[in-house]
Image (cartoon, rainbow, N blue to C red):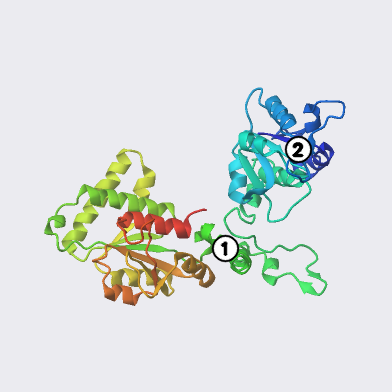
Amino acid sequence: MKISILTAFPGMIKNYLETSILGKGIAKGIFDVEVIDIRDFAQGNYKQIDDYCYGKGGMILMPEPLKKALEHLSRETKPYVVYPSPQGITLHQEIVEDLARKENIAIFCGHYEGVDERFTEKYVDLEVSLGDFVLTGGEMPAMALVDAISRLIPGVVGKTEAVQEDSFYNGMLDYPNYTRPAVWDDEEVPEILLSGNDKIIKEWRRRQSVERTLKRRPDIVGRAGIMPYLNYGAYVIEIYNSADDPKTYNSISEVFKLNLVDTATACKAYGIEKYILIAPDAQQRETIKQTISLLSEEAECKDRPDLKEALNNVKLFGSTQKALAWIEKREKTDLHKVVVTTKDCKKAVNWLSLKREILLKNYCTVFIFGRECELHSKIIDSVNTVLTPISGVKDNLNHLSVRSTISITLDRFFGQR
C-alpha cells in the first residue's frame, strides 16, 4: 500500500512518520508513505501556493499547484484522493477500513481557509473531518488517517488480536486496562485481573466493554454485533402452521424449501443456537424432517458443508410452549421472548432499545416469527417484548416474507456493522 501526503509543511509529517509503530512498518516495507511538498509544483521565484479568497476572506491554497502535484502522482495509477476538511464526513472506523483496502491514497493537507473549491469538486474523492472543530491545517488529520489506516495493514501491529479488540473495531468500546503497580495512589487493580484465570478475566472484560459502551456511547450499539458479548445463546422460532392446507401434509413446496434453506443459513451465519420450526401436526413434522434430510444429502453431494451444518441446526417441535421449555432447560435461565409482527401495537418497542436492553441485562433471547395468522393474540400477550414492524418507505405497506423479516432482524441485532 502506498500513501502520499501533500503538504506545505513536510517537516511536520516526516518527524511523525519516523516514530513508533508507523516508523517500524515503513522501515520493514510493509507500506510506503511519501511526503510531498506542494511548493515543488508552484511557479515563480517565491513558489506561491496560496492567494486571497474572492469576495473577501483569508488565504486559500491555489488549485494549479495541487493539480500538478496530483498529475505527478498519477503517472502510473491515479490515487484515491482524500481531503481532510471541516466540511467532510466525520471520520469513523468503517471509513478507515474502506481506506485500508485501497492500494494508492493521496491525502491533500489544506491550510489557511482551505482549498479552492474547483479542485475539491473535480479531483477529491472523499472529504473527511475529525470532528466539529477547526484546526489550522490538514497535517494533523492526515497523520491521524495514516495512523488509523496503518493499524489495519497486516504486520504493522504485532498481534492481530490487539487490533480486533480495539474500540469501534467490533462496534463496541474497549474494556479498561491496568498495569503495574497493583496499587497506585491508593487505587487497586481489580482483583479479578490478578486471578490468572483467563476465562473469568475474558468474561469480566467483555462485561466491562458492554457497560462502558452503554454508559458512554449508547449511540454506537446499533452498529455492533452483540453476540460475543452475551453469556447465553439466541434462538429463532418460526411458527409454521399450514393445517388449513392439507396438500402440504404429504408434500413440501419448492417455496418452502427455499425459505427453509435461506432462513437456516441466515441463522447459522448470525450465530443463532437453533432455528426452531413449529408444526403442530405430526404428519407435517415428519414430512419436514424428510425434506431436511434430502436437502442435507443434496448439500453433501454439492460439497456444501456450510449448508449441511445450517440444516443440522434446524429443530422441530409440535408447539411453541414445548420449544420454549426445551430452550429454558438447555440454557438453565429465564427466557426473554420477542415477537416480530407486521402490525404495530401499543406495547411495541424499537429494535435499538431492545438491543441495548439485551446487552445490559444479558438476556437469553428467543425471537418468534410467523405469518400474521399464526401469531395469534395468545402468543403476543405471552411474550416479553413485541418489536415495532419492519417498514419501508410506505408504512402502510408491509409485504415482507417471513424469511426476509428474520434476516433483517438478525442483522440488526447480531450483524457486524
Q: Residue furthest left?
A: 246
- Compare marks 2 and 1 and give the one earlier in the sequence: 2
* Residue 330 pos. (x, y %): 39, 68
187 vs 86, left or right, is right
Residue holding disc 1: 219
Distance from Cα at disc 2 to Cα at disc 1? 37 Å
Residue found 26% across the figure and 69% down from its top: 319
* Residue 31 pos. (x, y %): 69, 35
Q: Residue furthest right?
A: 45
399 vs 50, left or right, is left
Q: Is residue 382 above or below residue 151?
A: below
Query: Would residue 149 be seen by someone viewing this image from the given angle?
Result: yes
Amino acid type, mark 1: Asp
* Residue 282 pos. (x, y %): 18, 63
Q: Residue furthest front?
A: 55
In terms of depth relative to the viewer, which is nearer, 141 or 117? 117
